[in-house]
């Protein structure tokens, strides 16, 4: 029996890119899969564009208050019913074999993260490999030092999702949290196939390719809080 996929997307004023992203996702989904949209109060035409698809696989859940990126993704994940869950940003573009490749790899892995081509807002290549530019690699210690787990490149099974939810109030990167849970409680796999175009522009929610703007103290505090939270997950 084939597994049902839930693609979870957080949206906010994404009218410039969302149409091509949704099209690139829907063409890969089966009739029983779903695209879960959590919208954080868009004031542009994002919701109108989503409704214009008139596709029953698209399920839209507007937030009743502004939640920010982490809370917005949490809202989408809470609504997901699938066996395999993908995270998707509103402004990227998936290659045609992303879903099928991830599903094949999920036969032996709990979390799959694949490489991406990094492009600018005009579609011009900035980096041929996100993994190479970021220095992405598996390993708990490696990823405590510097996070490799970028949500838009990830999928994971329901067991990992159930361990990750609800998100602790202190985490500032949901994908980092999920990736570290897979490191300690599951089997993550880094796929070097470049399965999407990762669009970087001035309105992106987080500066994923660079180091964060947090102070050294804030970075240490974030890691300490993560470790405390992960200890509770470890004994579940």
Image: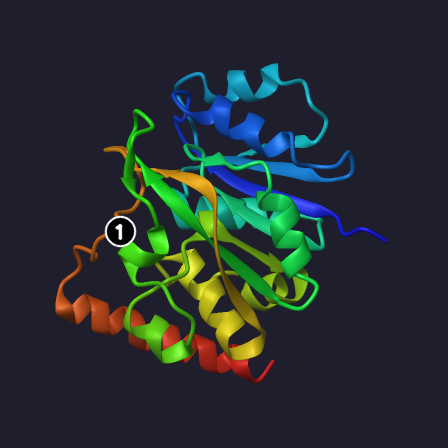
Q: Residue at x 29, y 30 (%)?
A: 124
Give how far across and how far down residue 115 sits, in percent. Answer: 43, 52
Helix, strand or loop status at disc 1: loop
Q: Position of residue 161 (x, y in %)?
A: 60, 61
Specify whether 208 is left or right of 197: left
Question: Eyeballing the image, is 29 above or below 19?
Answer: below
- What is the basis of the colouring in this image? rainbow
Q: Position of residue 166 (x, y in %)?
A: 54, 61
> Residue tagged by mark 1?
209
Q: Find residue 206 and report its horizontal and vertical position in percent.
A: 29, 46
Residue placed at 54% from the left, 65% from the top?
164
Instruction: Please identify the quarter of the rendering in which residue 96 is found.
Output: top right
The residue drawn where x is 51% and y is 50% is 74
Which quadrant is home to the C terminus?
Answer: bottom right
Would residue 17 be found to the left or right of residue 48 on screen? left
In the rendered image of this protein, does residue 52 appear above or below residue 9? Answer: above
Q: Residue furthest right?
A: 1
Q: Is residue 225 visible?
A: no
């Amino acid at each position: 029996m084939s597994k049902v996929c839930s693609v979870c997307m957080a949206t906010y004023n994404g009218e410039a890119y969302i149409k091509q992203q949704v099209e690139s996702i829907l063409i890969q989904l089966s009739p029983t899969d779903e695209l879960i949209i959590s919208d954080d109060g868009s004031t542009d035409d994002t919701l109108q564009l989503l409704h214009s698809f008139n596709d029953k696989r698209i399920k839209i859940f507007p937030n009743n208050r502004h939640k920010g990126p982490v809370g917005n993704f949490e809202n989408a994940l809470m609504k997901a019913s699938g066996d395999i869950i993908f995270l998707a940003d509103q402004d990227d573009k998936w290659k045609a074999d992303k879903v099928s490749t991830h599903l094949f790899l999920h036969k032996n892995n709990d979390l799959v993260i694949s490489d991406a081509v990094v492009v600018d807002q005009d579609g011009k290549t900035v980096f041929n490999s996100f993994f190479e530019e970021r220095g992405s690699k598996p390993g708990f210690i490696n990823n405590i030092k510097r996070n490799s787990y970028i949500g838009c490149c990830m999928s994971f099974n329901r067991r990992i999702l159930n361990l990750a939810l609800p998100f602790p109030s202190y985490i500032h990167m949901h994908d980092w949290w999920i990736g570290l849970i897979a490191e300690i409680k599951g089997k993550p796999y880094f796929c070097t196939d470049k399965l999407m175009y990762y669009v970087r522009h001035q309105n992106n929610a987080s500066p994923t390719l660079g180091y964060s703007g947090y102070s050294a103290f804030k970075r240490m505090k974030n890691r300490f809080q993560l470790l405390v939270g992960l200890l509770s997950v470890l004994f579940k």
